[in-house]
Image (tube, rainbow, N blue to C red):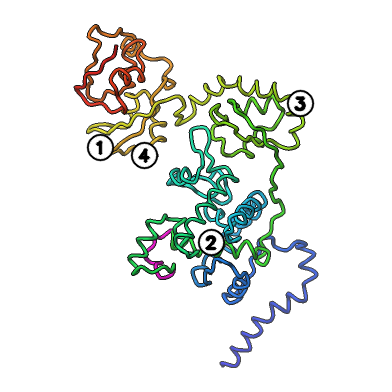
Amino acid sequence: MKIRVIVVLFWAVMLPFSALAQNTNQTRAENPKPTYDYAPDFSYDEIRKRYDKLDLEIDIAFNDRVMAFVNYFTIRNREYSREMLRREALYIPIFEKYLKKYGLPDELKYLPIIEAGLNPKAVSGPKAVGLWQFMRPTGREQGLKIDWYIDERMDPEKSTEAACKYIKWLYGFFKDWKMTLAAYNSGIGNVMRAMRRAGRKNDFWKVYRYLPRETRSYVPQFAAITYTMEYADEHNIFVTDPVYPVEFDIVKTNQFVYLKAFAEESGMDLETLKQLNPAIKKGAIPAHAKNFELRVPRAEMENYKLNETRVLAKAEAGKKEFEKMAKNMPGSTFGREKVVYRVRSGDVLGTIARKHKVKLSDLKAWNNIRGSMIRVGQRLNIWTGPDFYDNTVSTRRQIVRDQPIPSSKLHVVQSGDTLWDISRMYKGLTIERIKQLNGLKTNSLKPGMKLKIG
Protein backbone atom coordinates (compact mmCIF):
# COMPACT_ATOMS: atom_id res chain seq x y z
CA MET A 1 0.00 0.00 0.00
CA LYS A 2 2.76 2.40 0.93
CA ILE A 3 4.71 1.52 -2.23
CA ARG A 4 1.65 2.15 -4.39
CA VAL A 5 1.08 5.52 -2.76
CA ILE A 6 4.70 6.49 -3.36
CA VAL A 7 4.48 5.48 -7.04
CA VAL A 8 1.26 7.43 -7.47
CA LEU A 9 2.79 10.47 -5.80
CA PHE A 10 5.91 10.16 -7.95
CA TRP A 11 3.92 10.28 -11.20
CA ALA A 12 1.62 12.96 -9.83
CA VAL A 13 4.70 15.10 -9.35
CA MET A 14 6.58 14.12 -12.53
CA LEU A 15 3.77 14.11 -15.09
CA PRO A 16 3.22 17.88 -15.03
CA PHE A 17 6.94 18.43 -15.70
CA SER A 18 6.89 15.88 -18.51
CA ALA A 19 3.88 17.54 -20.07
CA LEU A 20 5.53 20.91 -19.64
CA ALA A 21 8.63 19.72 -21.48
CA GLN A 22 6.59 18.26 -24.34
CA ASN A 23 4.48 21.37 -24.79
CA THR A 24 7.15 24.06 -24.45
CA ASN A 25 6.80 25.25 -28.05
CA GLN A 26 3.01 25.29 -27.83
CA THR A 27 3.13 27.29 -24.59
CA ARG A 28 5.53 29.83 -26.09
CA ALA A 29 3.26 30.22 -29.11
CA GLU A 30 0.26 30.87 -26.92
CA ASN A 31 2.18 33.13 -24.48
CA PRO A 32 5.00 34.79 -26.43
CA LYS A 33 5.99 36.93 -23.43
CA PRO A 34 6.90 35.53 -19.98
CA THR A 35 4.81 36.61 -17.03
CA TYR A 36 6.08 40.12 -16.29
CA ASP A 37 5.53 39.96 -12.54
CA TYR A 38 6.79 36.44 -11.91
CA ALA A 39 8.61 36.35 -8.55
CA PRO A 40 11.34 33.69 -8.36
CA ASP A 41 11.29 31.52 -5.25
CA PHE A 42 14.66 31.77 -3.50
CA SER A 43 15.55 30.07 -0.24
CA TYR A 44 16.69 31.84 2.91
CA ASP A 45 20.28 30.64 2.38
CA GLU A 46 20.38 31.79 -1.26
CA ILE A 47 19.29 35.30 -0.29
CA ARG A 48 21.62 35.40 2.70
CA LYS A 49 24.65 34.42 0.59
CA ARG A 50 23.74 37.03 -2.00
CA TYR A 51 23.31 39.68 0.73
CA ASP A 52 26.67 38.84 2.29
CA LYS A 53 28.39 39.40 -1.07
CA LEU A 54 27.37 43.06 -0.94
CA ASP A 55 30.09 43.63 1.67
CA LEU A 56 28.31 46.68 3.08
CA GLU A 57 30.06 49.23 5.27
CA ILE A 58 26.90 49.44 7.39
CA ASP A 59 27.15 45.90 8.75
CA ILE A 60 23.60 44.75 9.46
CA ALA A 61 23.58 40.99 10.01
CA PHE A 62 21.16 39.05 7.84
CA ASN A 63 18.45 37.47 10.00
CA ASP A 64 14.77 36.59 10.02
CA ARG A 65 13.71 40.22 10.37
CA VAL A 66 15.74 41.28 7.35
CA MET A 67 14.43 38.28 5.41
CA ALA A 68 10.83 39.25 6.20
CA PHE A 69 11.36 42.67 4.63
CA VAL A 70 13.19 41.18 1.65
CA ASN A 71 10.06 39.09 1.03
CA TYR A 72 7.96 42.22 1.36
CA PHE A 73 9.95 44.21 -1.21
CA THR A 74 10.56 41.34 -3.66
CA ILE A 75 7.26 39.46 -3.40
CA ARG A 76 4.43 41.16 -1.54
CA ASN A 77 5.01 44.73 -2.72
CA ARG A 78 7.03 44.37 -5.89
CA GLU A 79 5.24 47.35 -7.40
CA TYR A 80 6.76 49.65 -4.76
CA SER A 81 10.26 48.36 -5.54
CA ARG A 82 9.59 48.76 -9.25
CA GLU A 83 8.52 52.38 -8.72
CA MET A 84 11.72 53.07 -6.76
CA LEU A 85 13.72 51.72 -9.71
CA ARG A 86 11.76 54.04 -12.01
CA ARG A 87 12.75 57.07 -9.95
CA GLU A 88 16.31 56.19 -8.96
CA ALA A 89 17.93 58.13 -11.83
CA LEU A 90 16.26 61.31 -10.54
CA TYR A 91 17.82 61.27 -7.09
CA ILE A 92 20.37 58.49 -6.48
CA PRO A 93 23.18 60.38 -8.32
CA ILE A 94 22.56 63.38 -6.04
CA PHE A 95 22.76 61.18 -2.95
CA GLU A 96 25.95 59.51 -4.18
CA LYS A 97 27.59 62.89 -4.81
CA TYR A 98 27.04 64.20 -1.29
CA LEU A 99 27.71 60.88 0.47
CA LYS A 100 31.09 60.81 -1.25
CA LYS A 101 31.73 64.45 -0.33
CA TYR A 102 31.16 63.74 3.38
CA GLY A 103 32.86 60.33 3.41
CA LEU A 104 29.70 58.39 4.27
CA PRO A 105 28.75 54.82 3.28
CA ASP A 106 27.43 54.63 -0.26
CA GLU A 107 24.50 52.39 0.72
CA LEU A 108 22.92 55.32 2.57
CA LYS A 109 21.69 56.41 -0.86
CA TYR A 110 18.82 53.96 -0.33
CA LEU A 111 17.70 55.53 2.96
CA PRO A 112 15.29 58.04 1.32
CA ILE A 113 13.44 55.06 -0.19
CA ILE A 114 12.52 54.01 3.35
CA GLU A 115 12.02 57.58 4.49
CA ALA A 116 9.97 59.07 1.66
CA GLY A 117 9.62 56.71 -1.29
CA LEU A 118 11.93 59.01 -3.31
CA ASN A 119 9.32 61.76 -3.15
CA PRO A 120 10.83 65.22 -2.43
CA LYS A 121 7.43 66.60 -1.41
CA ALA A 122 6.57 63.76 1.00
CA VAL A 123 5.00 64.90 4.31
CA SER A 124 4.52 62.44 7.16
CA GLY A 125 1.85 62.48 9.87
CA PRO A 126 4.21 64.14 12.39
CA LYS A 127 5.02 66.76 9.68
CA ALA A 128 8.44 65.47 8.68
CA VAL A 129 9.12 66.72 5.15
CA GLY A 130 11.12 65.85 2.06
CA LEU A 131 13.32 63.03 0.81
CA TRP A 132 15.15 62.85 4.14
CA GLN A 133 12.07 63.55 6.29
CA PHE A 134 13.41 66.42 8.37
CA MET A 135 11.27 67.82 11.16
CA ARG A 136 11.18 71.62 11.11
CA PRO A 137 13.56 72.22 14.09
CA THR A 138 16.15 69.71 12.84
CA GLY A 139 15.96 71.10 9.32
CA ARG A 140 16.58 74.63 10.56
CA GLU A 141 19.44 73.42 12.76
CA GLN A 142 21.06 72.03 9.61
CA GLY A 143 20.71 75.39 7.84
CA LEU A 144 17.62 74.74 5.74
CA LYS A 145 15.33 77.72 5.11
CA ILE A 146 11.70 77.08 5.98
CA ASP A 147 8.97 79.72 5.69
CA TRP A 148 5.55 80.26 4.11
CA TYR A 149 6.99 80.47 0.60
CA ILE A 150 10.05 78.19 0.64
CA ASP A 151 10.81 74.87 2.31
CA GLU A 152 14.32 73.68 1.52
CA ARG A 153 13.55 70.31 3.10
CA MET A 154 11.95 69.62 -0.29
CA ASP A 155 15.05 70.67 -2.23
CA PRO A 156 16.87 67.44 -3.25
CA GLU A 157 20.33 69.04 -3.30
CA LYS A 158 20.12 71.13 -0.13
CA SER A 159 18.24 68.56 1.94
CA THR A 160 20.70 65.83 0.93
CA GLU A 161 23.68 67.89 2.01
CA ALA A 162 21.92 68.74 5.27
CA ALA A 163 21.15 65.05 5.84
CA CYS A 164 24.77 64.08 5.23
CA LYS A 165 25.97 66.64 7.78
CA TYR A 166 23.42 65.41 10.31
CA ILE A 167 24.16 61.70 9.77
CA LYS A 168 27.90 62.36 10.03
CA TRP A 169 27.31 64.15 13.33
CA LEU A 170 25.13 61.29 14.63
CA TYR A 171 27.78 58.73 13.73
CA GLY A 172 30.39 60.80 15.53
CA PHE A 173 28.16 60.58 18.60
CA PHE A 174 27.29 56.84 18.52
CA LYS A 175 30.32 55.39 16.67
CA ASP A 176 28.01 52.68 15.37
CA TRP A 177 26.06 52.70 12.10
CA LYS A 178 23.04 50.72 13.26
CA MET A 179 22.59 52.99 16.28
CA THR A 180 23.09 56.00 14.01
CA LEU A 181 20.26 54.81 11.77
CA ALA A 182 18.05 54.20 14.80
CA ALA A 183 18.73 57.73 16.07
CA TYR A 184 18.05 59.21 12.62
CA ASN A 185 14.65 57.53 12.69
CA SER A 186 13.49 58.17 16.25
CA GLY A 187 15.82 60.82 17.65
CA ILE A 188 18.80 60.69 20.00
CA GLY A 189 16.59 60.84 23.09
CA ASN A 190 14.72 57.63 22.31
CA VAL A 191 17.91 55.76 21.48
CA MET A 192 19.72 56.95 24.62
CA ARG A 193 16.71 55.92 26.70
CA ALA A 194 16.75 52.45 25.11
CA MET A 195 20.48 52.13 25.80
CA ARG A 196 19.99 52.97 29.48
CA ARG A 197 17.17 50.44 29.81
CA ALA A 198 19.37 47.80 28.14
CA GLY A 199 22.17 48.34 30.66
CA ARG A 200 24.00 51.06 28.69
CA LYS A 201 24.72 48.75 25.77
CA ASN A 202 25.63 50.27 22.40
CA ASP A 203 24.50 47.42 20.16
CA PHE A 204 21.31 47.69 18.10
CA TRP A 205 20.19 44.10 18.59
CA LYS A 206 20.80 44.28 22.36
CA VAL A 207 18.72 47.44 22.75
CA TYR A 208 16.24 46.32 20.07
CA ARG A 209 13.30 45.52 22.37
CA TYR A 210 13.58 48.87 24.16
CA LEU A 211 13.36 50.95 20.99
CA PRO A 212 10.13 52.38 19.55
CA ARG A 213 8.31 49.81 17.40
CA GLU A 214 8.88 51.75 14.18
CA THR A 215 12.62 51.97 14.85
CA ARG A 216 12.88 48.21 15.44
CA SER A 217 11.70 47.73 11.87
CA TYR A 218 13.69 50.63 10.43
CA VAL A 219 17.17 49.09 10.45
CA PRO A 220 16.14 45.64 9.05
CA GLN A 221 13.99 47.45 6.48
CA PHE A 222 16.96 49.52 5.35
CA ALA A 223 19.05 46.36 4.94
CA ALA A 224 16.25 44.74 2.93
CA ILE A 225 15.71 47.67 0.55
CA THR A 226 19.49 47.85 -0.02
CA TYR A 227 19.46 44.17 -1.00
CA THR A 228 16.36 44.64 -3.18
CA MET A 229 17.76 47.58 -5.13
CA GLU A 230 21.07 45.81 -5.69
CA TYR A 231 19.52 42.51 -6.75
CA ALA A 232 16.23 43.62 -8.31
CA ASP A 233 17.02 41.87 -11.59
CA GLU A 234 17.59 38.57 -9.79
CA HIS A 235 14.02 38.85 -8.53
CA ASN A 236 12.64 39.73 -11.96
CA ILE A 237 11.91 43.33 -10.97
CA PHE A 238 12.49 45.51 -14.01
CA VAL A 239 11.21 48.82 -15.35
CA THR A 240 10.46 49.73 -18.94
CA ASP A 241 9.78 53.43 -18.35
CA PRO A 242 12.49 54.91 -16.11
CA VAL A 243 12.23 58.61 -15.26
CA TYR A 244 15.28 60.72 -16.04
CA PRO A 245 16.11 64.16 -14.67
CA VAL A 246 15.56 67.27 -16.75
CA GLU A 247 18.82 69.08 -17.42
CA PHE A 248 18.67 72.57 -15.97
CA ASP A 249 20.49 75.86 -15.57
CA ILE A 250 20.27 78.35 -12.72
CA VAL A 251 18.64 81.78 -12.82
CA LYS A 252 19.51 83.86 -9.76
CA THR A 253 16.83 86.30 -8.68
CA ASN A 254 16.46 88.98 -6.00
CA GLN A 255 12.87 89.92 -6.72
CA PHE A 256 9.37 88.54 -6.32
CA VAL A 257 8.69 85.87 -8.97
CA TYR A 258 5.24 84.41 -9.61
CA LEU A 259 6.02 81.08 -11.30
CA LYS A 260 2.80 81.02 -13.31
CA ALA A 261 3.52 84.42 -14.89
CA PHE A 262 7.20 83.49 -15.33
CA ALA A 263 6.21 80.32 -17.22
CA GLU A 264 3.64 82.06 -19.40
CA GLU A 265 5.95 84.88 -20.44
CA SER A 266 9.00 82.66 -21.02
CA GLY A 267 7.09 79.89 -22.79
CA MET A 268 8.30 77.31 -20.27
CA ASP A 269 6.15 74.48 -18.98
CA LEU A 270 4.85 75.37 -15.50
CA GLU A 271 4.77 71.75 -14.29
CA THR A 272 8.40 71.27 -15.32
CA LEU A 273 9.36 74.40 -13.37
CA LYS A 274 7.55 73.05 -10.31
CA GLN A 275 9.26 69.67 -10.61
CA LEU A 276 12.67 71.30 -10.89
CA ASN A 277 11.95 73.53 -7.88
CA PRO A 278 9.99 71.46 -5.33
CA ALA A 279 11.11 73.74 -2.48
CA ILE A 280 8.85 76.53 -3.83
CA LYS A 281 5.74 75.63 -1.84
CA LYS A 282 3.19 78.19 -2.97
CA GLY A 283 4.18 78.88 -6.56
CA ALA A 284 6.13 82.08 -5.90
CA ILE A 285 9.57 83.27 -4.79
CA PRO A 286 9.44 86.10 -2.24
CA ALA A 287 11.47 89.26 -2.69
CA HIS A 288 13.29 88.61 0.60
CA ALA A 289 14.79 85.33 -0.75
CA LYS A 290 18.05 86.93 -1.83
CA ASN A 291 20.01 85.29 -4.65
CA PHE A 292 17.40 82.55 -4.97
CA GLU A 293 18.55 79.91 -7.44
CA LEU A 294 15.63 79.12 -9.73
CA ARG A 295 16.17 76.00 -11.83
CA VAL A 296 14.97 76.32 -15.43
CA PRO A 297 15.12 73.74 -18.24
CA ARG A 298 18.45 74.01 -20.04
CA ALA A 299 16.68 73.66 -23.39
CA GLU A 300 14.80 76.92 -22.67
CA MET A 301 17.73 78.91 -21.29
CA GLU A 302 18.83 80.61 -24.52
CA ASN A 303 15.33 81.90 -25.24
CA TYR A 304 15.02 83.09 -21.63
CA LYS A 305 18.23 85.12 -21.83
CA LEU A 306 16.94 86.90 -24.93
CA ASN A 307 13.79 87.97 -23.07
CA GLU A 308 15.04 88.06 -19.46
CA THR A 309 14.01 91.63 -18.64
CA ARG A 310 10.48 91.20 -19.95
CA VAL A 311 10.01 87.80 -18.30
CA LEU A 312 11.16 88.99 -14.87
CA ALA A 313 9.02 92.13 -15.12
CA LYS A 314 5.96 90.02 -15.90
CA ALA A 315 6.79 87.60 -13.08
CA GLU A 316 7.02 90.47 -10.60
CA ALA A 317 3.87 92.15 -11.91
CA GLY A 318 2.00 88.93 -11.19
CA LYS A 319 2.22 89.64 -7.45
CA LYS A 320 -1.33 90.99 -7.21
CA GLU A 321 -2.79 87.94 -8.93
CA PHE A 322 -0.71 85.68 -6.68
CA GLU A 323 -1.73 87.44 -3.47
CA LYS A 324 -5.40 87.19 -4.37
CA MET A 325 -4.97 83.50 -5.04
CA ALA A 326 -2.78 82.92 -1.96
CA LYS A 327 -5.24 84.54 0.42
CA ASN A 328 -7.91 82.08 -0.64
CA MET A 329 -5.80 78.91 -0.46
CA PRO A 330 -7.24 76.32 1.98
CA GLY A 331 -5.49 76.82 5.30
CA SER A 332 -3.66 79.90 4.04
CA THR A 333 -1.82 82.06 6.57
CA PHE A 334 -0.72 84.57 3.94
CA GLY A 335 -0.82 88.14 5.27
CA ARG A 336 -2.24 87.04 8.62
CA GLU A 337 -1.09 87.26 12.20
CA LYS A 338 -0.92 84.30 14.53
CA VAL A 339 -3.12 84.26 17.63
CA VAL A 340 -3.10 81.44 20.19
CA TYR A 341 -6.58 80.73 21.58
CA ARG A 342 -7.13 78.61 24.69
CA VAL A 343 -10.32 76.53 24.50
CA ARG A 344 -12.92 77.36 27.16
CA SER A 345 -15.76 75.32 28.57
CA GLY A 346 -18.63 75.25 26.07
CA ASP A 347 -16.47 76.09 23.06
CA VAL A 348 -16.95 74.25 19.78
CA LEU A 349 -14.82 74.61 16.65
CA GLY A 350 -17.60 76.28 14.66
CA THR A 351 -18.13 79.11 17.15
CA ILE A 352 -14.39 79.63 17.56
CA ALA A 353 -14.02 79.90 13.77
CA ARG A 354 -16.91 82.38 13.49
CA LYS A 355 -15.63 84.47 16.37
CA HIS A 356 -12.22 84.86 14.73
CA LYS A 357 -13.75 85.21 11.24
CA VAL A 358 -11.87 82.26 9.76
CA LYS A 359 -12.99 79.18 7.87
CA LEU A 360 -13.69 76.07 9.94
CA SER A 361 -11.65 74.02 7.45
CA ASP A 362 -8.70 76.40 7.91
CA LEU A 363 -8.95 76.18 11.70
CA LYS A 364 -8.80 72.40 11.49
CA ALA A 365 -5.90 72.45 9.03
CA TRP A 366 -3.83 74.85 11.16
CA ASN A 367 -4.20 72.59 14.18
CA ASN A 368 -4.12 69.18 12.46
CA ILE A 369 -7.67 68.38 13.66
CA ARG A 370 -9.50 65.72 11.66
CA GLY A 371 -12.77 65.44 13.54
CA SER A 372 -14.45 67.98 15.78
CA MET A 373 -13.19 67.03 19.25
CA ILE A 374 -11.42 69.70 21.31
CA ARG A 375 -10.72 69.84 25.02
CA VAL A 376 -10.86 72.60 27.61
CA GLY A 377 -7.44 74.24 27.94
CA GLN A 378 -6.29 73.13 24.49
CA ARG A 379 -4.32 75.77 22.61
CA LEU A 380 -5.42 76.48 19.05
CA ASN A 381 -3.28 78.35 16.53
CA ILE A 382 -5.40 80.83 14.60
CA TRP A 383 -4.18 83.13 11.84
CA THR A 384 -6.31 86.25 11.80
CA GLY A 385 -6.24 88.87 9.13
CA PRO A 386 -8.21 90.35 6.25
CA ASP A 387 -11.72 88.94 6.05
CA PHE A 388 -11.40 86.66 3.01
CA TYR A 389 -13.76 84.28 4.77
CA ASP A 390 -16.84 86.45 4.30
CA ASN A 391 -16.84 89.26 1.75
CA THR A 392 -20.42 90.17 2.63
CA VAL A 393 -19.88 91.08 6.27
CA SER A 394 -23.10 91.46 8.20
CA THR A 395 -24.40 94.97 8.89
CA ARG A 396 -23.90 94.48 12.62
CA ARG A 397 -20.19 93.66 12.17
CA GLN A 398 -19.68 96.57 9.81
CA ILE A 399 -21.21 98.99 12.32
CA VAL A 400 -19.02 97.64 15.13
CA ARG A 401 -15.92 97.98 12.99
CA ASP A 402 -16.61 101.55 11.99
CA GLN A 403 -17.34 103.03 15.40
CA PRO A 404 -15.03 105.90 16.36
CA ILE A 405 -12.44 105.62 19.11
CA PRO A 406 -14.15 106.72 22.38
CA SER A 407 -13.08 109.90 24.12
CA SER A 408 -11.59 107.89 26.99
CA LYS A 409 -9.32 106.25 24.42
CA LEU A 410 -9.52 103.02 26.42
CA HIS A 411 -10.97 99.61 25.69
CA VAL A 412 -11.78 97.21 28.53
CA VAL A 413 -10.97 93.64 27.45
CA GLN A 414 -13.94 91.29 27.59
CA SER A 415 -13.78 87.52 27.94
CA GLY A 416 -12.80 86.04 24.57
CA ASP A 417 -11.50 89.32 23.10
CA THR A 418 -8.43 89.10 20.85
CA LEU A 419 -6.26 91.88 19.46
CA TRP A 420 -7.78 91.19 16.06
CA ASP A 421 -11.33 91.59 17.42
CA ILE A 422 -10.45 94.87 19.09
CA SER A 423 -8.62 96.26 16.05
CA ARG A 424 -11.76 95.67 13.95
CA MET A 425 -14.00 97.43 16.42
CA TYR A 426 -12.53 100.89 15.87
CA LYS A 427 -11.95 102.74 12.64
CA GLY A 428 -8.29 103.14 11.70
CA LEU A 429 -6.99 100.91 14.52
CA THR A 430 -4.51 98.09 13.81
CA ILE A 431 -3.03 95.28 15.87
CA GLU A 432 0.41 96.84 15.58
CA ARG A 433 -0.92 100.17 16.87
CA ILE A 434 -2.55 98.50 19.91
CA LYS A 435 0.71 96.74 20.74
CA GLN A 436 2.71 99.93 20.33
CA LEU A 437 0.36 101.99 22.53
CA ASN A 438 0.36 99.39 25.30
CA GLY A 439 3.90 98.05 25.09
CA LEU A 440 2.63 94.54 24.33
CA LYS A 441 5.14 91.94 23.19
CA THR A 442 2.66 89.07 22.84
CA ASN A 443 -0.97 88.68 21.75
CA SER A 444 -2.12 87.45 25.17
CA LEU A 445 -4.99 89.35 26.77
CA LYS A 446 -6.81 88.97 30.08
CA PRO A 447 -10.41 90.01 30.80
CA GLY A 448 -10.52 93.39 32.56
CA MET A 449 -7.32 94.73 30.99
CA LYS A 450 -7.58 98.37 29.95
CA LEU A 451 -5.97 98.95 26.58
CA LYS A 452 -5.08 102.32 25.10
CA ILE A 453 -6.61 102.55 21.66
CA GLY A 454 -5.88 106.16 20.75
Residue 240 placement: quadrant: bottom right
Q: Amino acid at mark 4?
A: Gly
The location of residue 152, given as percent across then percent down, is 54, 40
Q: Residue at x 57, y 47 (%)?
A: 119
State if disc 1 and disc 3 touch (CB < 8 Å). no
**Callout 3: SS:** helix
Along the viewing direction, whichever of 127 and 188 lies nearer the viewer = 188
Residue for badge 1: 377
Residue 243 as seen in the image, left or right of residue 432:
right
Where, quadrant-wise, is the C terminus in this rendering?
Answer: top left
Residue for badge 2: 222
Q: Earlier in the sequence, mark 2 or mark 1?
A: 2
Q: Earlier in the sequence, mark 4 or mark 1?
A: 4
For the residues labelled 3 and 4, the Cα–Cα distance comes to 53 Å
Name the disc covering residue 306, or none.
Answer: 3
The magenta segment is: 205-214
